[in-house]
Amino acid sequence: MLLENMTMAEFKKHLKRTKSIIFPFGTVEEHGNHLPLNTDTLIIYEALKRVIKKRKVFLAPPVYYGVCTTTAQHPGTISITPETLRRITLDVVRDSYKKGLRNFFLVTGHGGGLHSAALKEAAEILIDELKGISMAVLCPYDVIHKELSEIAETANDSHAGEIETSLVLYLSPELVKGRSREEYPKLPRPFIVQDKMKYWPGGVWGNPAKASKEKGEKALRLIVDKIIAIIDMAGKKKI
């Protein structure tokens, strides 16, 4: 049930069937020289479109902007602050609650630490504030990391690497512009550096050359199945 395509009457009708809504979060962020800036948003929104074909859940339009730190200086990245992300999340959930929704799934296609922390902080505020709600904050790459790593040939695969490239190849192959070279960030942890591009010029973490549509299809199936399992978990017991 795509919220953006509904009329008022359709919303009221479907609200009788479900009180659950998914809010997708993505980014406008560099993904090497071969993947589009909307990679995080594209992958998670397409996965969630498949989820709502199997479960009666509202799917809100994606929030396209997220908190990007390591990639903030790369061309094309447009970041927001953690405070902005918290405020957006608080506002949309509070207003959805007023409209009768009670089960909220905040699903992010971007796994940045400050980004995820902002979503979790907002969820903690909301769970104390709003009566009778359930809240879940989920980044699929975190909860099925082991399963995805078994698909990838590249050890330590991550941003714009084998798995993300495979997913975009499967979902929108026309958006994949060749392959960036294999690369891994060389940031001097635990130091916070100002010139991040000095340590990660290409913005790739992994080997995109090993990507394939077949791997993308397998990875997407894992993501969809995991999100469905979490939705079902929320429906079976009081969280």
Image (cartoon, helix red, strand yellow):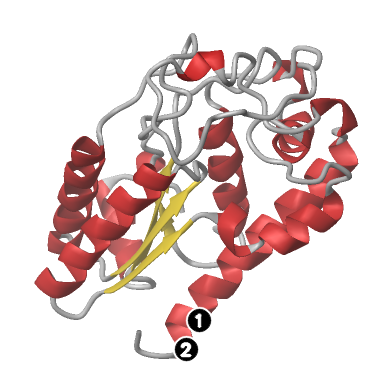
- How packed mark 1 is, by other alpha carbons closer than 10 Å (few <14, some 14-19, many 20 or more), is few
Q: Amino acid at mark 2?
A: Lys
- For mark 1, what is the residue? 233
Q: Is residue 145 left or right of residue 198?
A: right
| Residue labelled with disc 2 | 236
Give the secondary structure at mark 1: helix
Residue drawn at point x = 61 percent, y = 48 percent: 47
Where is residue 57? Give x, y as percent.
45, 63
Secondary structure beneath dot 2 equals helix
**Residue 60 seen in the figure:** no
Q: Nearer the viewer, residue 132 or 72?
A: 72
- The part of the image, by quadrant, that contains residue 67 is top left
- What is the x, y in percent for residue 45? 53, 42
Residue at left 89%, top 44%? 153
Query: Could you tell me if the residues under marks 2 and 1 are in contact, i.e. CB atoms within 8 Å?
Result: yes
Q: Residue furthest top?
A: 75
The front one of 148 and 107 is: 148
> Looking at the picture, does residue 59 appear above or below residue 17?
above
Whether residue 92 is situated above or below residue 173 in the rendered picture? below
- Where on the picture, by quarter, is residue 94? bottom left
Residue 232: x percent and y percent? 53, 78
Q: Residues within 10 Å of mark 2 (few under 14, many from 20)?
A: few
Q: In this picture, is 182 found above or below 148?
A: above
In this orientation, does residue 114 appear? Answer: yes
**x and y percent of residue 97 in the render?**
18, 63
Say what amino acid the circle numbered 1 marks: Met
Could you give the CA–CA distance between mark 2 and mark 1, rounded to whole angstroms?
5 Å
Q: Dividing the image into 4 quarters, which one contains the C terminus?
A: bottom left
